[in-house]
């Protein structure tokens, strides 16, 4: 025992805080770090920032504010939405300042002025991933420094394993003293590469930034590197505006745009550029000057461009193509031939016989789609680096938790399919061999086996629960020990461990437990006035407002709205679709009594609910921009590794930042006392893993056992 005490004391001296000390430190810091972190809302999107003075001075990223003097709003953790003005920006380092235009004092954090950090140090990243979400404080994430730069968020950054993603841009990176040491800037595809602007490079230009000076050009780094930038059309827009000005008096369309400026989509800007200032090096594609009706089974021309080969040959809109090169062809077949190019002999059902030679035209560009509701994170191609001293530190850090590791070896099994492939993990819940696992990972139960202490055992599948995605299974094996549960609500910043394939995995609780809604149902904070709340969600399978769920105790529930009702009229006016209805409800205020006409089976029923202020726990209606945001976050996250097939739609979840693999779901998430606080249920996003909380497990198990008996 004396040797173990000496050993752990040596770990503390050599490698910093022990797990229990780190747990205590981060939990204590978390509330103050979250309070000082803000969302910055401008141009329909949002980034993050950190307040660093009681008067409301904020440090953020240059790619969030873009230029000095911009008016915007900031959202504080206490719910206040306040006006702000951007100060100086430095696009070379990606650092920037802004000022809240309201009287303080504000919650703030101190910041370092010189390098006080080293490789291997722990650091805490905070921000608003995906944008500020209704009812969710800014999540915290823990990681180690793998690079300790001082000069730039690009070329000499602080790099950590504290995972950030789009929407986190401009948020703070803290040391374990609660001081700001960096600002979230950019990421690579790897989950391990998260880059932050070092505070020393911002301090170097502090006075100039306070005086609204601007350094470099927005998008300069991205244009130099050729990577995806937050404003993916910045360079295109610059070239378009330059060409537009040069066309004044030469082109009627240019004169019209100059007289009444409007924001064009990238395809329209590119089409005008191709006309006004064509790029000689742009990719070319064959063109015949005709468009087909791709919904028609018979190849039918819907448009012919004047002066192009099809028009010169005498083809016209409405012509149906019967033969191509003397052979019958389908619409898709003809479209592919038009794309491939070459000489084509066309015969129409009207008797026309023509030969077409294509001309070379600039190929249609493909542009990335910007995502509403968040500022995207700049993406670089930097490879992941894990210094040897970090690997050694982490091994020593986890050495104190050997007791938990030993216990998990008796309480966790690996599930394998008929081919012997590891597909999921299971947690022992009683001595009879009953276990919980992730249902959607073991859909094929034929030949399913469980590996326990080197031996494979056949698995008996008993029942599954769709809501939580948990399944009850059983094996007959000696030596199984059920986990001990702790149903207390885990605290933000709490250190916890999960069972990995090769040992323990550590992470922290990033935010309070809450619903993990389906794609498109988690709503971003968008306005200064609380949105009026009805308490329903709409089916994503229809563009019409068909009620999918009614929240218990909501205005809709009390007024008698039912699942399956279709809303026909709102306040006496016909509803044009989900977006139309949501827009009209959002213009109402809490306390307003509204009249709704619904279709229920073959009846029409008039209902008059009184709208309320949206509660923090309310699941929103399906929102297409939210769905787009979720899709973009998933695509970006999947670049770093595999995500779970089912990773949303849970009634209650523990959110944590441990990098678990989909095969490791079904295993327990443990506190430092060796108690299970939940069952890992999904690797959801780059910065997010989910667990079903322990306080829900007993109810789920009773439900599963009843199903199994039936």
Image: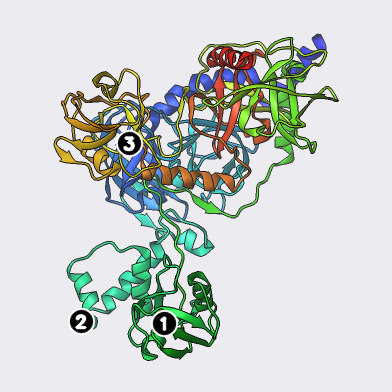
Q: CA distance from mark 3 to mark 1?
A: 45 Å
Q: Position of residue 666 (x, y in %)?
A: 65, 26
Q: Position of residue 283 (x, y in %)?
A: 51, 76
Kindly identify which residue carries mark 3.
546
Mark 2 residue crowding within 10 angstroms, few (<14) / some (14–19) / many (20+): few
Instruction: Report the side of 470 relative to 250 (left or right).
Output: right
Question: Element at badge 1?
Answer: loop
Instruction: Report the side of 685 relative to 503 (left or right).
Output: left
Q: Is residue 493 above or below residue 92?
A: above
Give the number of the mark in front: 3 or 2.
3
Q: Is residue 626 above or below residue 495?
A: below
**Label 3 or label 1, whichever comes before in sequence order:** 1
Residue at 40 percent across and 34 percent down: it is 522
**Label 3 or label 2, whichever comes before in sequence order:** 2
Residue 315 got which mark?
none
Give the number of the mark in front: 3 or 1.
1
Kindly identify which residue carries mark 2.
249
Quarter of the figure with the C terminus: top right
Question: Element at badge 3?
Answer: loop
Q: Position of residue 204 (x, y in %)?
A: 45, 47
* Quadrant housing residue 669: top right
Quarter of the figure with the N terminus: top right
Question: 681 or 93: which is nearer to us?
Answer: 681
Residue at 54 percent across and 25 percent down: it is 468
Kindly identify which residue carries mark 1.
349
Instruction: Report the side of 515 relative to 327 (left or right).
Output: left
Residue at 51 percent across and 27 percent down: it is 510
Give the number of the mark in front: 2 or 1.
1
Mark 3 residue crowding within 10 angstroms, few (<14) / some (14–19) / many (20+): many
Question: Element at badge 2?
Answer: loop
* Quadrant housing residue 129: top left
Q: CA distance from mark 3 to mark 2?
A: 52 Å
């Amino acid at each position: 025992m004396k040797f173990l005490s000496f050993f752990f004391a040596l770990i503390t001296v050599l490698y910093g805080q022990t797990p229990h000390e780190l747990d205590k430190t981060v939990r204590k810091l978390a509330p103050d770090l979250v309070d000082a972190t803000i969302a910055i809302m401008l141009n329909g999107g949002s980034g993050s920032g950190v307040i660093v003075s009681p008067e409301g001075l904020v440090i953020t990223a240059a790619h969030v504010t873009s230029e000095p003097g911009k008016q915007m709003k900031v959202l504080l953790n206490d719910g206040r939405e306040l006006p702000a003005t951007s100060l100086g920006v430095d696009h070379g380092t990606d650092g920037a300042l802004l000022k809240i235009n309201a009287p303080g004092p504000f919650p703030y954090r101190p910041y370092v002025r010189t390098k006080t950090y080293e490789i291997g140090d722990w650091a805490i990243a905070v921000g608003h991933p995906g944008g500020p979400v209704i009812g969710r404080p800014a999540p915290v994430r823990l990681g180690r420094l793998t690079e300790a730069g001082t000069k730039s968020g690009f070329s000499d950054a602080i790099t950590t394993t504290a995972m950030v993603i789009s929407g986190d841009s401009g948020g703070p990176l803290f040391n374990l003293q609660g001081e700001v040491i960096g600002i979230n800037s950019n990421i690579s595809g790897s989950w391990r590469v998260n880059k932050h602007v070092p505070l020393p490079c911002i301090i170097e230009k502090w006075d100039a930034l306070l005086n609204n000076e601007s350094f470099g050009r927005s998008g300069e780094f991205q244009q130099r590197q050729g990577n995806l930038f937050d404003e993916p059309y910045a360079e295109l827009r610059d070239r378009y505006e330059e060409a537009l000005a040069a066309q004044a008096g030469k082109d009627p369309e240019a004169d019209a745009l100059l007289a009444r400026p409007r924001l064009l989509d990238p395809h329209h800007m590119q089409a005008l550029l191709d006309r006004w200032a064509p790029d000689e090096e742009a990719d070319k594609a064959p063109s015949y000057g005709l468009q087909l009706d791709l919904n028609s089974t018979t190849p039918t021309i819907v448009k012919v461009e004047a002066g192009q080969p099809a028009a010169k040959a005498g083809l016209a809109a409405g012509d149906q193509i019967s033969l191509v090169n003397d052979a019958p062809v389908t619409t898709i077949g003809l479209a592919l031939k038009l794309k491939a190019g070459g000489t084509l002999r066309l015969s129409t059902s009207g008797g026309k016989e023509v030969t077409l030679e294509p001309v070379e035209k600039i190929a249609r560009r493909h542009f990335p789609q910007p995502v509403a509701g968040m500022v995207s994170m700049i993406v670089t191609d930097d490879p992941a680096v894990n210094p040897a001293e970090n690997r050694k530190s982490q091994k020593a850090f986890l050495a104190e938790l050997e007791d938990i590791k030993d216990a998990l070896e008796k309480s966790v099994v690996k599930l394998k399919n008929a081919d012997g492939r590891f597909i999921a993990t299971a947690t022992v819940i009683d001595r009879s061999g009953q276990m919980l696992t992730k249902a959607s990972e073991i859909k094929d139960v034929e030949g399913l086996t469980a590996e326990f202490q080197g031996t494979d055992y056949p698995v008996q599948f008993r029942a599954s629960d769709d809501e939580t995605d948990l399944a009850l299974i059983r094996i007959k094996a000696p030596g199984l020990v059920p986990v001990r549960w702790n149903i207390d609500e885990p605290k933000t910043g709490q250190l916890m461990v999960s069972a990995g394939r090769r040992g323990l995995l550590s992470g922290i609780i990033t935010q309070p437990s809450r619903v993990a809604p389906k794609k498109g149902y988690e709503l971003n904070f968008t306005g200064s006035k609380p949105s009026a709340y009805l308490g329903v969600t709409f089916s994503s399978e229809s563009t019409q407002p068909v009620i999918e769920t009614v929240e218990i105790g909501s205005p809709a529930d009390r007024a008698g709205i039912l699942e399956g009702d279709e809303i026909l009229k709102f306040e006496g006016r016909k509803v044009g679709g989900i977006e139309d209805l949501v827009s009209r409800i959002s213009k109402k205020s809490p306390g307003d009594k509204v009249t709704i006409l619904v279709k229920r089976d073959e009846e029409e029923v008039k209902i008059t609910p009184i709208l309320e202020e949206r509660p923090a726990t309310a699941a929103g209606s399906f929102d297409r921009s939210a769905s787009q945001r979720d899709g973009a976050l998933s695509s970006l996250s999947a670049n770093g590794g595999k995500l779970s097939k089912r990773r949303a739609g849970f009634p209650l979840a523990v959110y944590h930042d441990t990098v678990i693999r989909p095969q490791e779901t079904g295993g327990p998430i443990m506190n430092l006392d060796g108690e299970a606080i939940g069952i890992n249920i999904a690797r959801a996003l780059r910065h997010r893993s989910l667990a079903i909380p322990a306080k829900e497990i007993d109810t789920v198990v009773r439900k599963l056992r009843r199903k199994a008996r039936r």
